[in-house]
Amino acid sequence: MKKALELARLGEGYTSPNPLVGALIVKKGKIIAEGYHEKYGENHAEVNAFLDASEDVKGADMYVTLEPCSHQGKTPPCADRIVKEGIKRVFIGMKDPNPLVAGRGVEILEKNGIEVKSGILEKEAVELNEIFIKYITENKPFCILKTAMSLDGKIATSSGDSKWISNEKSRKYVHQLRHRVSGIMVGIGTVLADDPMLTTRLENKKSKDPHRIIIDTEGRIPLDSKILNLKSHSKTIIATTEKITSEKVKSLEDKNAEVVICPLKNNKVDLNYLFEYLAKMGIDSILVEGGSTLNESILKEKLVDKVVTFIAPKIIGGSQAKTPVEGEGFKYIKDSVKLENIKTRYFDEDIMISGYIRKEV
């Protein structure tokens, strides 16, 4: 199952909004086939494993990270194919979280005399598909809040200089995160200060640009911003409000940007409305990269699922130097955002801390 999970990760960035799935076929203690879901709309992992088989699979065992599908989508049901191929036993990482189909794949297998065991490395299987699970069960994008700060909690100096707080290895990992998600979100302040491209740049494989989403309440984005003048297959989405002028909307649309007029909430873009809109577009995951005003808003709206923070061993100081989350903040410690399932990882001298937002009961 560990090997199947490793295979599944090879599909990161290419299968959305489908899950990441890996599959192995084992016969007489030997792996005779491997497969993973490589791209949305193409063969599922189980089918690719059958196509890879080095010998007859009849009577063999299959290990698959997610319950085989039982319905006709862009491809035929994998559960039926497993029955047809004569697999004897199926070991499953986790059952399908989709409430409309959960358990049906297992039911088809068992009805046809195939022995099924579920929950093999289930925790790892769930983490692998945290994006898919959130999107399929709640119809909302999975949201990752990413920040990078100095040891004393600054994201820039008092002059606004921020390049670079984190090191090169940390920044490369952020591009892996960008490749994995469907959308990347920043506030207009970040665009005005840094003029970013928000593209994905990976060395060893063809990278996928996420859709670029700019929170711009008043439509202040300059028309010569890099983000409006890119050659990219993904969209640039300007989330704004009635405060934008019709002339600016036309100018942005002439730049091939998609303008989304959102309701006002606390005199800003209504982020809940925006997230629902993005989910309907098929955007299943969003990486929020700042700035500090947007970070506060999105945390207070309880839209964040996971936090990824890079801490560099540098001390910047300065009462006017920005921190990752600003605005009014939370008045009492008891109301602060709390994380659980914490993990740490080193990128040379940088420390990355990640965790999930603890859901209040």
Image (cartoon, rainbow, N blue to C red):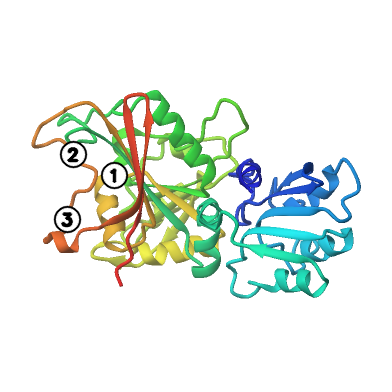
Q: Residues within 10 Å of mark 3 (few under 14, many from 20)?
A: some
Quarter location, residue 271: bottom left
In the image as oriented, which residue stretches furthest toward the right?
56
Residue at (36% x, 57% y) in the render = 304
**Horizontal and vertical percent position of residue 156:** 22, 32
User: Mark 2 — residue?
Assistant: 322
Q: Residues within 10 Å of mark 1 (few under 14, many from 20)?
A: many
Q: Secondary structure at mark 3?
A: loop
In this rendered view, identify the residue nearer to me: 12 or 259.
Answer: 12
Three-letter code, disc 3: Gly
Spatial CA span between label 3 and label 1: 14 Å
User: Which sits earlier in the primary sequence, circle 2 or circle 1?
Assistant: 1
Spatial CA span between label 2 and label 3: 13 Å
Residue at (49% x, 62% y) in the render = 134
**Horizontal and vertical percent position of residue 269:** 32, 60
Three-letter code, disc 2: Lys
Spatial CA span between label 2 and label 1: 9 Å
In the image as oriented, which residue stretches furthest toward the left?
319
User: Mark 3 — residue?
Assistant: 329
Give yes or no for contact between labels 2 and 1 (Cβ–Cβ under 8 Å): yes
Q: Secondary structure at mark 1?
A: loop
Q: Residues within 10 Å of mark 2 (few under 14, many from 20)?
A: many
Residue at (82% x, 60% y) in the render = 88
User: Which sits earlier in the primary sequence, circle 3 or circle 1?
Assistant: 1
Q: Disc number at residue 291?
A: 1
